[in-house]
Amino acid sequence: MAEIIEQDKGGGGKKRAKKSPGHIDMTPMVDLICLLLTFFILTAAFNKPKIMTINMPDKQASEQNVIKDRMLNILLAENGKVFYYMGMIDNDQPLPTLIESDYSKDGIRRVLLEKNRNLFTTIAEYNEARLTGQNKDADSTTVRKIREWKTEDYNNPSGGPIVLIKPDAKSTYKDLVNMVNEMAITNVGVYAIVDVAPQEKELMAKAIGTVSN
């Protein structure tokens, strides 16, 4: 409680301090508390976690619809080694042969460009037209068109590759980032990062052993 000191002159000309209780107006403080309370309530309501339901595809249906001939499996091994093979491993068929490659422009990039030539050419020519001013599509239109071309390519039985990037436990994040970057450079329509199958680990071990020898 604040105190106000008043000086009063007593008899004989002496000054005497007189204390009296002060008064604090709490009305502004109440208004401030109400405003703060309202702010915190609204903030808590806006920051509620939002849950989005994702319907996962049926495993059996997806396996039946996959075009095996278009599957390009890229295996990332230790020491920056890259292997690839086409198709899918079938327990009733002999295991595929891994082909060694690297991250150079004449390595895995050339493989991706050869197998994705049609889609890559379409997108490259479109981007070149935009750079030279022959095409003045807005950015939103460009994104939509490229998305549509990639969707059409995926649904086309003779379309480009469906790439599965499979990093081994001994590979590095740098290798994975470089491979994802290659997907963007070569305009690959569909790719995914998945685990390495046990059979593929055996194939990589044999391939690395053969290369080392």
Image: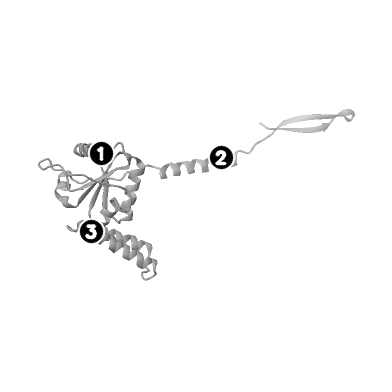
Label ID, residue 30? 2
- Report helix, strand or loop for mark 2: helix
Q: Which of marks 3 and 1 precedes in the sequence?
A: 3
N-term mark: 3 or 2:
2
The part of the image, by quadrant, that contains residue 132 is bottom left
Look at the image and name its color scheme. one colour
Q: Amino acid at mark 3?
A: Asp
User: What label sits on residue 145 in the rendered view?
Assistant: none
Q: Picture quarter containing residue 204? A: top left
Q: Nearer the viewer, residue 130 or 174?
A: 174
Real-space CA distance between mark 3 and mark 2, rounded to the nearest whole angstrom: 65 Å
Q: Can you identify the residue that label 1 sits on?
A: 208
**Secondary-structure class at tag 1:** helix
State the residue at coordinates (31%, 61%). Answer: 144
Name the residue type under label 1: Ile
In the image, which is nearer the foreground, mark 2 or mark 1?
Answer: 1
Residue denoted by label 3: 153
Gap in angstroms between the C-alphas marked 1 and 3: 34 Å
Can see residue 51? yes
**Which tag, 2 or 1, sits closer to the chain's start?**
2
Q: Is residue 50 visible?
A: no
Q: Position of residue 124 (x, y in %)?
A: 32, 62
* Image height of 169 relative to 105, above or below: above
Please tell me whether mark 3 sits on a helix, a strand or a loop: helix
Question: Which residue is nearer to you in this view: 50 or 88?
Answer: 88
Spot occupied by residue 110 in the image (x, y as percentages of width and height): 28, 54
Q: Residue furthest right?
A: 12
What residue is drawn where x is 26% and y is 50%?
A: 191
